Image (spheres, helix red, strand yellow):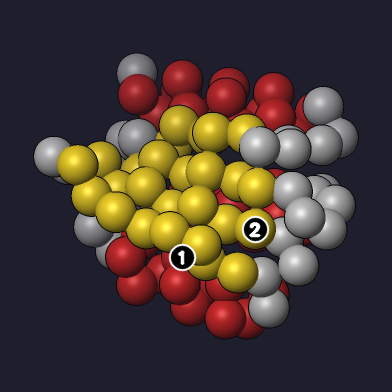
Amino acid sequence: MAESKAKKTVAKAAAKGTVKNAAINMRGLKCPLPTLKTRKLLSKMAMGEVLVIECTDPLTTIDIPNLIRETGDKLERSGKKGRVLTFTIRKV
């Protein structure tokens, strides 16, 4: 159920063509889906836009920063509240 909701949220953001200052719920998705979906969303963003990813998969603490190093974008903030991991990414 959570995966279905996350897929719909990501699909809606991607369909808009721009995900400016979007908060994307990827809770319940397992590795590597959060990272792959984040890469796809970042590729559709314009410079300066901000993307906030919310995940529950502990592997994203490794995967998302590695993705950001590859893409050259900026990880502005990351944190954890309960089981939810949050990453704030600025497209550069």
Write down the residue under mark 2.
90
Residue 14 shows up from this direction = yes
**Residue type, mark 2 in image:** Arg
Give the secondary structure at mark 1: helix
Q: Quadrant of residue 83?
A: top left
Q: Kindly report which numbered mark, 1 or 2, lies closer to the viewer in this rendering.
A: 2
44 vs 29, left or right, is right
- Looking at the figure, which quarter contains the C terminus? bottom right
* Residue 45 spot, x, y in % from top left: 80, 49
Residue 33 shows up from this direction = no
* Residue 28 spot, x, y in % from top left: 32, 35
Question: Which residue is located at x 50 percent, y 52 percent?
Answer: 88
Work out whether residue 89 or residue 55 is closer to the camera in this orientation and state it. 89
**Residue type, mark 1 in image:** Ile
Q: Quadrant of residue 63?
A: bottom left
46 vs 63, left or right, is right
Q: Quadrant of residue 90?
A: bottom right
Q: In the rendered picture of this protein, how many numbered marks are placed on residues?
A: 2
Which mark is on residue 53?
none
Question: Which residue is located at x 52 percent, y 66 percent?
Answer: 75
49 vs 79, left or right, is right
Question: Which residue is located at x 57 percent, y 81 percent?
Answer: 69
* Residue 48 spot, x, y in % from top left: 77, 55
Asked whether the beta carbons under mark 1 and mark 2 sit within 8 Å of each other, the answer is no
Give the secondary structure at mark 2: strand
Write down the residue under mark 1.
64
Q: Earlier in the sequence, mark 1 or mark 2?
A: 1
Whole-Å distance between the Cαs marked 1 and 2?
A: 13 Å
Extreme-left residue of the structure: 82
